[in-house]
Amino acid sequence: MSPAAQADGAELARRLDALLPQTQCTRCGYEDCRAYAEAIAQGEAPINRCPPGGAEGIARLAALTGQSAEPLDPSCGAEGERTVVWIDEAWCIGCTLCIQACPVDCIVGAHKRMHSVIESACTGCELCLPACPVDCIEVASVTPGRSGWQAWSPADADAARQRYLARQARQQRLAADHAARLEAKAEHKLAHLDELTKANTPTELARKRSVIEAALARARARRSPT
């Protein structure tokens, strides 16, 4: 693909992403809204796989792409009222699994402490439901009688996108910091291999050096992904 074609594809993906509700629910079959937009732009996915956007969302995508507005693919779910989740405090065990599953950081809490949902930030993605081991998360409708873009707004989508991107950036920083610590630890062990090895026979030293060098290579690869 030529650079011009790549640029055109990237711009189309950006415009398609701007038309998606940014719930990051993965019901379309892709890891996030941006990935789905890129798949549409590349001709790898149809435009009718977003239940949160509903029929109006499909119409918006059709207008941009020139494709026909087909009915929502039922394998992705059904268009419905906007929902949020809440946590039953009596049953929450503070496992943090829901916090890890939430794509927009709307669940707060700590290990072995009760968690709470920031309902104004919840996108209704429901990814926390299967993560909860004690089934203490409930779902409630907050837009009775309204679904799709009638229950969601561009401002809601923008806020959700920003929260999602902020979470992604934080996770990348944490992963890089963790890789840096592993790299420093491996380098220290490698530099002091003789004194840290009890059975420092040539064979054992060679084996441990090989293991540490492999760990060091993995840590460096995490810091500098290709």
Image (spheres, grey):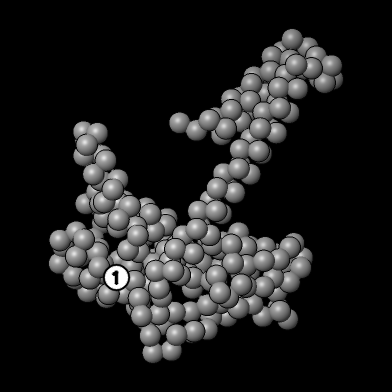
Q: In the depicted view, which residue is nearer to us: 207 or 118?
A: 118
The percent coordinates of residue 81 (x first, y second) are 41, 82
| Vertical position of residue 104 compared to residue 171: above or below | below
Q: Quadrant of residue 100?
A: bottom right
Q: Quadrant of residue 48?
A: bottom left
The percent coordinates of residue 217 (x first, y second) are 59, 25
At 78% from the left edge and 12% from the top edge, which residue is drawn? 201
The percent coordinates of residue 96 (x first, y second) are 67, 63
Q: Quadrant of the C terminus?
A: top left
At 69% from the left edge and 70% from the top edge, which residue is drawn? 115
Q: Residue furthest bottom?
A: 145
In this figure, what is the number of numbered marks? 1
At 52% from the left edge and 77% from the top edge, which residue is drawn? 84
Q: Quadrant of residue 221?
A: top right
Q: In the depicted view, which residue is nearer to us: 28 or 119?
A: 119
Q: Quadrant of the N terminus?
A: top left
- The residue identified by callout 1 is 57
The percent coordinates of residue 171 (x first, y second) are 58, 48
- Amino acid carrying label 1: it is Gly
Few, some or many residues within 10 Å of mark 1 (<14, 14–19, 20+): many
Q: Residue furthest top?
A: 202
* Residue 80 visible in the shown view: no
Q: Residue furthest front?
A: 155
